[in-house]
Amino acid sequence: MKLKFWLFIFALLLVTTAHGKQNILLLRHAEKMTELKDPPLTANGHKRAECMAEWLAAQPFAEEIKHIYSSNYRRTLETATPLALRLGVSIRLYDTRKLGDLAVKINANKNSVVIVGHSNTTPALAGHFSGQKIKPMEETDYNSYWRVNSAGAVKLDQRLIACEF
């Protein structure tokens, strides 16, 4: 009985602390084909995009996500689309050469968002939001993501999404 009570309290704290603050999730696109200039996702990439969408849609802050931002490349758009469909939100395009402008825009509107980018832009944006120096991602890293939330102070977490193929 005590265990159930404490699990309930923990779940309640998890939900209440996630709500009411801006959550910014930064993801890298899923696996891409390599032989094209603007490559689409591979079959495993599509599976990973679906897995990431399922995982993100189940998070306590998912209902607060107002927009999904994606660079204007097939691989990022194909990664963002399953989540946008699950959440019923729009995908907005951003210019990978103007990451600072995107960070300012997102910080100003205070909405929770997901940003799908690349091995270099995703950590760069995490740095813009957190004020920290973040090293680029490995070319084979498709599971890491950064979550930045602002409840008084900016907190940056790098975590893994358990999607393996």
Image (cartoon, rainbow, N blue to C red):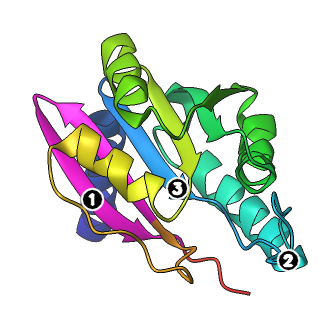
Tell me whether circle 2 and circle 1 mark residues in contact (CB < 8 Å).
no
Q: Earlier in the sequence, mark 3 or mark 2?
A: 3
Give residue 123's quadrant in the image.
bottom left
Relative to residue 63, is residue 54 drawn left or right?
A: right
Could you say which disc has been placed on residue 157 in the image?
1
Q: Main secondary structure of the magenta part?
A: strand
* Residue 124 part of the magenta segment: no
- Distance in Å between CA atoms under marks 3 and 2: 23 Å
Name the secondary structure under disc 1: strand
Residue 7 lies, in percent from the top left, at 32, 61
On the rendered image, what quadrant is the C terminus found in?
bottom right
Q: Is residue 40 above or below residue 132?
A: below
Amino acid type of the residue tagged 1 in the rendering: Asp
Residue 113 lies, in percent from the top left, at 49, 32
Q: Residue at x 58, y 51 (%)?
A: 56
Q: Which residues are magenta?
A: 145-161
Query: What residue is disc 3 on?
Result: 27
* Residue 154 part of the magenta segment: yes
Name the secondary structure under disc 3: strand
Relative to residue 134, is residue 92 drawn left or right?
A: right
- Pick whichever, 5 or 80, lies toward us: 80
